[in-house]
Amino acid sequence: MDDSTKWVKHIELYVNSSTTPSQQAASVDAIAALVKNDMLTLETLVREMEIYLTTTDSIIRSRGIILLAELLSQLTLKPFSDSSLHSLIGFFTERLADWKALRGAIVGCLALLRRKIDVGIVTDIEVKAVAQSYLRNIPVQSLGQHERKLSYELMECLLDCHAGAVRDLGDELFDVICEAIDGEKDPQCLLLVFHIVESLAHLYPGPSGPLANFAEDLFEILGCYFPIHFTHPKGEDDDVKREELSRALMIAFASTPFFEPFSIPLLLEKLSSSLPSAKVESFRYISYCTAKYGPDRMAKHAQALWASVKDATYISPESTLLMDSESIGGMNFQYSDIMTQAYILLQEVIRQDGGFISLIIEDNDINIFVNFLDQYKDFDDIPVQVKQRLHAVGHILTVCAKPSVALCNKVFERFFPLLMDALGLSVAKPSESSYLDEDCFSSVKYNFGALYLCIELLAACRYLTVSLDDCTLIPDVSHQTWCTMLSSFSKSLVKAFIFLIRSNNADKTHSAYVYFGVKGLQILATFPGSFLPVSKSIYDKILVELVSIVTYDMNRTLSWTLALKALVEISLFIDKSPDSEKAASFESIVVEKIVDLTSSDYSAMPSSLKLQAAFDIGATRKVFMLRVAEGLDEAISTNLSAVNDHGNLESHELLVKLLDTYSNKIFPWFLEIGGSEEIPLSFALSIWDKIENSRSFSISPPKIGSDLLGATINAMKKAVSTCSKESQEIIINKAFGVLLSSKLFAIQEFESDSSILKAEGLKNSSCRDEWLTSLFASVVTSLRPQTSIPHGKMILQLFITNLLNGHIPSAHALGSMVNKLPLKDPGSNFSKNFSLDEALDMIFCSFIGTSCSDSTPGNEGSEIDFSSLRLHTIEIQSVKLNTINGLAWIGKGLLMRGHEKVKDITMTLLSFLTLNSNAGVSREVQDVKEVCDEDDMHQLMKCLGDAFHIIMSDSKSCLNRTYHATIRPLYKQRFFSTITPILLSLAVKSELSVRYMLYRALAHVVSNTPLTAILGEAKKLVPVLLDCLNMLSKDVLNKEIVYDILLVMSGILMNKNGQEAAADNAPGTVNQLIELTTYSHVMAIRETAIQCLVAMSELPYARIYPLRTQVLQAISKALDDPKRVVRQEAVRCRQAWSSTSSRSLQF
Amino acid sequence: MPSGLINANPTVYERQERRTRNAPADVDELAVEPIDQLEIFDILFYIKDPEHPYSLEELKVITADAIEVDDKRSHLRVTFTPTVEHCSMATVIGLCLRVKLMRCLPPRYKVDIRVEPGTHATEAAVNKQLNDKERVAAALENPNLVDMVNECLAPSFE
């Protein structure tokens, strides 16, 4: 049979030891596929293989057995009959004794033992036979690494998957396992070994089992590995991590309580090791073991455990004071790993065994420490070591008090009275009603230690109540000892905290007292509602005190910020655990007061602080923010009228700040929490209302007016951009209504008459008109693309007119409109919605001589409508500049959405730019040349060049993501690749002055294009960029452009492909860069030029060697540069270049 | 060269915390930043000792205070302290300092390098050797010496 010969050939291939591993693997796959698809039965196969399985040649035999085993591991999903399974497992069991062919036998056993029940599994009796054969025949430690690993895997499989079958092997199993794992050193095998021990522990959990007897032997082997430490850190077994091994060993340690008498003493002993990692590991292991062994077994070690924890945390703490801790009470410590693990252990022990606490609270050292806290009055007098101890004691007590009410009681009973005593507090008598009674403060002592511990205890019991509060079953804590103690002292505690905050004169030594005073108040105010000791009157007192700090104490920055932060925390807490009573009093005491602050003229407080406080408090809850916004709105109203009617300068400043708060904080906040747009909407509408209602709107000094207008425009844009489509439509309609009602809409006449030049300019328009158009433009700028614009034509006309009068926001609005207008009219019956094509028609009519409809794409005949320029010369200048700017913004809008008309605009700009040199200029152009003098012409050309800057650069004020611009991916790259060839070819043809302007345009395009696009064109660009640098660097005013090009150059030079392009132009590049190293106007240019030279030194040797002298001479001048940074770069550059040739020191 | 080290066990000091320059917020393009003591020290401190893998700063061979600069008159004086009195490496250290300064300072500077008075057995001879143009030039013709100097200066560009 053809098939049979084929697969027999595969077998031969595999057994043949001269074939490659990949061929062998292919053979196994081929045979397995045959068996899987029932083309070949297992019986036939085995029968055919008989000779290989039984031959006396041990090499061929082992290959044969491995082949069979490999096949079986591939066939784990193929059902086998019981009889074939039986004979196979019998065969492999027997083969375990054949040490020359052991690997195949183990693999085969593994494959069969791992089968799932639905494809037929081996019986328990067979498993037991395998196990017995294993125990009898495999000398694990004398095998090689791979075989050892396999045999551990087999043992693991026996223990995990067939526990029932091997359980009664008992002592024999232990004997063999102990022998097998003793002295294992390979990390991968060790992972298995640790797991085997763990499985053994699961197999024999009872005290009567063999594990109890063998625990000591087994642990003797295991214990040697602790702590895990690699002597050869960079071995080939990098795949097994130390952490992984250490974790496996830890689980093995904790697998059975029978290890306890051996493991805990070992671990405790290792704690005294000098190796920090050993200490960390020991603490980690003990914590884990404690959790697994249970409290009964650990009880006898309690003393030793406490001693070791105390040693690590209290006696010789390894913590460092954090640098920035001054502002947060000076007690912020960073623990070492050892301390962290020690605290974790303490926590675990306390959680397991409540009795442990008596060790701590009876501890002599701690008690003495607490009793002698009062020797340090001043925070700065306390030595760092004592601070460390104080911190440790605080942490230990916190850990003790946190887990349960009973523990908390014990800690409180022991320490709370001591601390109260140390602070000089007594139980407040109920008769005392006045809080600020001076004589009750006289008893408060400055005792930082006591204060600190007291705050830590309060924090711990607050944590406890909050965690109890989270449970569904709320136990009654009010009768617990700690609770009654705290409630009896709460009044005097509050008094003491207030006293500490107020008493000092903001000097540095007291900052710690202030910090902990405020923290104490905050903790007391954030106990959950169900908790009694802090009554409502105390709560109110705390709020009043904190608010009064915020209101009156702004000169003490620290306490001011802390108090504000505390209020924010308190408010957030109310939000988390709702408590209507407290929420109400918070609102009436804090929020009302803060809102009052912003709207009132209370002048002692700087307005920026007022606004910060208002925003911070408001940001905690939406209700508060709405309330705050209401207050701010009022404030804007009053101040706006103050500015408008009385020319009040202070109000003006405040107004600008208010508007900035809106645009920088409140709108982003609402955007972040999402959903709510009532505030932006009502803000925008109310601004329009205000404009509408104040007929005579004038803000006297123009500087102030423009400041204010800028802030308002900004706020308006932010407000509109956060709104949804519907709200935006409300706003734009409102705005349009206001606009319509003003006399500005004399413009309506224009609807029939497209000649915009008859329009009166904005120049002599009133302040109110300017506000109206600017705000309207800002609304249009930030609309969403979906929002429909009413009376599009009129609006467009208005903007075009204003633009020609030099109104930049109108240009932004025009750019945004062409960017977002729909391509085709969506509903033709809805005549108000007009489409992009119509808009472009109008724009092209106004700016460019041709109409959109008859200009075919690529038609170069579109020309500027110079009829607009036939006014008297002064006006020409400004009108032309404005037209060009406007065109640039419109071009940007079109470019970003990827519209092809952008080509028309750029061609127009370019044709204007090159009109000087064009021989066949039209008559109109000649006219222009006649009326313009040289200077005007120059300025105009410059403006044309810079138009490309507007088109390519990212703008913050419009056409970006925030203002919902339509942005096509890679639009910059696309523009770059179309415009650069045109610019280059024009530049070649034109005369010097024009080329200068073309280079300016090119520089703007190139410096705004992503570097990857430029690198592709580097070969062509490098010479041009050098020319650019050469020309532009002659004028100081171009310094920013020069810097931008230089950055592009350095980008090219840093890149592999770019370097090739630079190598072709090496002499020119070097010359130009050398020239720039003396560019006296900008340090950054000199620095970058030298960096570029450094990069040049890596070009091919033959290219740069002739340039070496030149560079070194230039650099030796740069060594005397007035700026240090440049000198440093020069040194680097000199080193780089002199090492390219020889070690000569001539230069 | 002697087979053993001249100072087999030098005292290594901890590196001093560097005086940091606070960069002005807005750069005044025309303001001149004169070359000062700290700048010179920044150039010199990480020169490696010829014998040990420590920098001259760590061995306190040079300190910031031992550098006197007068930028207006283009004059610089560096005073260094050999670790032991009979240190034959003093000339090599001095040569390293000179080469490094030649590479980093503008040519207008006149550089004086000398041994701290009373710290070296043949102080006068060393000083004379280090400030003799001809002898420095001659020393730099010697490839062994140049290699040694370059090795000491090497880490500064890593």
Image (cartoon, grey):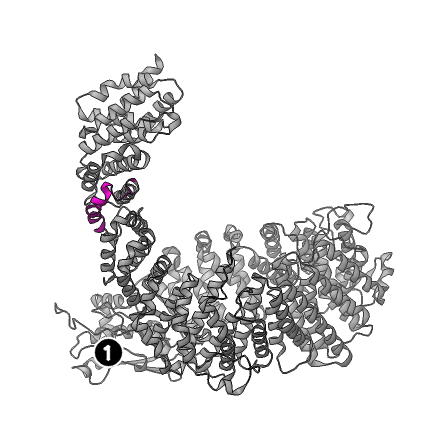
Pinpoint residue A495: horizontal percent, then vertical percent: 51, 79
Quarter assignment of residue B45: bottom left
* Local secondary structure at mark 1: helix
What residue sits 75% from the left and 57% below the top?
A864
Residue shown at 21%/31% (left/top)?
A: A132
On the question of residue A77 being in view, the answer is no
Q: Position of residue B143 (x, y in %)?
A: 22, 66
Q: Nearer the viewer, residue A495 or A555?
A: A495
x, y percent for residue A518: 50, 75
> Between residues A665 and B63, which one lies in front from this camera angle?
A665
Main secondary-structure element of the magenta-colored stretch: helix
Q: How many marks?
A: 1
For the record, the magenta segment spans A203-225
The residue at 23%/79% (across/down) is B81
The vertical placement of A1115 against A62, above or below, is below
How far across and down, in percent of the image, does residue A787 sit? 73, 53
- Drawn side of residue A1124 relative to residue A434, left or right: left
**In the rendered structure, does residue A213 fall within the stretch colored magenta?**
yes
Residue A274: name its quadrant: bottom left
The answer to whether residue A1077 shows anywhere in this view is yes
Q: Quadrant of the C terminus of chain A?
A: bottom left
The 10 Å Cα crowd at callout 1, few under 14, some 14 to 19, many 20 or more, is: many
Q: Is residue A1080 magenta?
A: no
Q: Chain of mark 1?
A: B
Nearer-the-camera pick, A1087 or A100: A100
Residues A997 and A608: in front is A608
The three-letter code of the residue at mark 1 reads: Leu
A156 lies left or right of A776: left
A1032 vs A557: above or below: above
Question: In which quadrant will I find the N terminus of chain A?
Answer: top left
Provide the residue designation for mark 1: B130
